[in-house]
Amino acid sequence: MRLLFILALVHRQQQRGLSGVSAWSWSPSNNNDIASTGPQVSGHTCVASPIKSSGGANENAKIFLFGGQLPLPSSEDSSAERTLDISGGAGAAVTSSSGRFGPPSKFQTPAEARAESERLAAAASAGRRSNDDDPPPAAAAATHDLWVYEKDKEDPSLPDWTLVPRKDQGISRPSARSHAAAAVLGHMMFLFGGYDPAAGKELGDVWTLSMKSHKWSLCQAWMPYEISNHVACAISKTKVGIFTRRGDVLVYDDDLPTPSVLERATTGEGPGELRSCACCGIPRTAADDADNAENERDMLIFGGSTGETSGFSSDAFRLDTTSWEWTKLVPKSPNNEFPPALRSASVASIGKNRCVVFGGAASNERVGAIRPSDETWLLTVDGDDANWERIAVDGPVNPEARLAASLIATTPEELVLQGGYDPTNERTFGSTPGTAGGGATWILTKRPIDHSKIAKEKAARQRKMRDAQLTEAEAAASRVSDIIAGAGSGMGFDGASLGVGGLDHVLEEVKRRIWTPLAAPPKLLKELGIQPTRGLLLYGGPGCGKTLLASRLGNMLSPFRPITVVNGPEILDKFVGSSEENLRRIFDDPPDIYDEFKRNETDGGVALGHAAVHVVVMDEFDAVARSRGGGGAGAGGQ
């Protein structure tokens, strides 16, 4: 019984050790108590400027965030159509009033879409000139705000996020949209397509933003068709790769005489028609491994789905942007831990064929719903292998589960998480300062591993587990004593109740010496220094009721498990040591406790099984308990 308890404790420690002590940890931004903490959106586009190197040290990149889905309308406005964002950086909108998922499937011609985009841009510019400081109307489902994130090292008290004034963004700018795709070439941000929930249509325009002047320009290039739910990343210093929900690969080439977006034929096993995937660029070779977007990179695609609540994928694919051949990566993990099938997850490349994946939505097809995730994973691509490792599991606080957020690396060892949506609680994250557990912006950092600190933390966790186990053992012992007390109270020791006649004086002695200590609170016995009696010898002539009394008392004192009845001669064996082994087996392998006592126990009844009394009734005990060397009759031989 004690051996069973020790094995259970070791098993718990090993289960806890699967995740180990991670070198990554989450922490809320230091400026989350400042009123202007940042944009409260989901399904937005977000990119980082190239990371500069100054004096051998990396400087933090700026983050540019555009558009996105606004928070849900107030529940008091029952007539308003509620638009939910349950997709990724290039996802879809869900209109709950009509039950329609995603943007419409109708595609305009490029000429029609370009004219519509210019009309929307002109309308947005006219609205800005008429009232520059007015916020977007409450009925709008998306925004066209532009935010910049930058750490001020000289004055950390300043807000990290800054809203770029509309008048500083140029004569024209993109219309309000969500679920677009964006990438960075040099110091220019390229914005591709998206979805306009207010107009109920997808867009096919291409815009550029200067990261230095913060001014927008409408690009001459145009998407082959209007699209959202797509993803993009830079694959060279002049090209952007785009993966659409149709399964197509488009390439924007800025080096052509007339910059264009063209469809590229691919080979191999690709993702197929998936929406709301996670995408990032990874270096093609070791020579390309640098912290900027100017080297040649392949496209990495992870997750996605064919529908809103079904067809979710957990596969990762790599597209060689030289041969344009897809390769389905083989998932591997040292701990056999893998992320679930996800859509709308956030991903950021951190160099050296590595990227970080956070959040997303897993599908519960049985109830036709999705479940947001709060897990953080490190993906390392090694040839055709996708090596997964769960990270950031030992921090004091972690971001709430969400999807359609943005995750951007400002340095290879620091990432910024912003926005996102929790469909379970219908909450859009972003600009609520001072909330429990974090607020608007979260920072994921990689810290040097302090092995001495790890050893101390491991020892502390083990002490905590031992204390918790001790608490469970004390609670189980108290419950055992309560049930034994109830079994023997009242008429429990009455001869007529037990079906044993003429032995009332023996029952009274058993009640005083055996039952009372077992029924008393364990803490009281410990304070008084009383040790419960461990055994009882019943003796008498044949047929006086010894076996019957022992069996009835055993059932009363052991309500948790069956009693063990052994005839003395059964223990004896002709081989040397076998009799002792038979005796040890009786005490080392007690019967398991009844199932009714396991059902509501968090540990499956392990602590209760350790505390429960095991009653062993040894009949004909005189067959094995002779005095050493005794062979005669009478007192000398018994």
Image (cartoon, grey):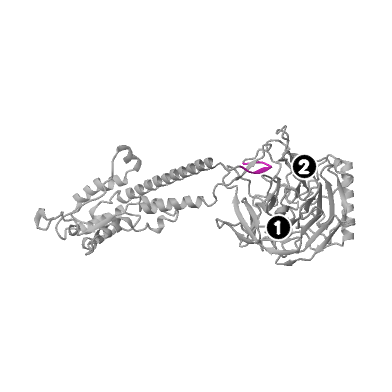
* 438 within the magenta span: yes
Q: Where does the magenta region start and end?
A: 437-447
Q: Tell me the element at label 2.
A: strand
Q: Is residue 4 left or right of residue 26?
A: left
Residue type of the residue flagged with mark 1: Leu
79, 310: nearer the viewer: 310
Q: Tell me the element at label 1.
A: strand
| Residue 23 makes an appearance in the image | yes
Residue 541 placement (x, y as % from top left)? 14, 58
Residue 276 placement (x, y as % from top left)? 72, 57
| Disc 1: which residue | 300
Crowd rating for badge 1 (residues with CA inside 10 Å; few <14, some 14–19, many 20+): many
Q: What's the mark number on residue 148?
A: 2
Q: Is residue 34 left or right of residue 174?
A: left
Residue type of the residue flagged with mark 2: Val
491, 564: nearer the viewer: 564
Dot placed on the residue nearer the N-terminal end, 1 or 2: 2
Q: Is residue 357 above or below residue 269?
A: above
514, 583: nearer the viewer: 583
Tell me where residue 546 sits by quadrant: bottom left
Residue 468 placement (x, y as % from top left)? 45, 45
Among all residues in the image, which is located at the extreme front?
Answer: 287
| Residue 314 makes an appearance in the image | no
Quarter that holds the C terminus = bottom left
Q: Is residue 579 left or right of residue 233?
A: left
Find the distance from the CA under tag 1 to the CA under tag 2.
Answer: 26 Å
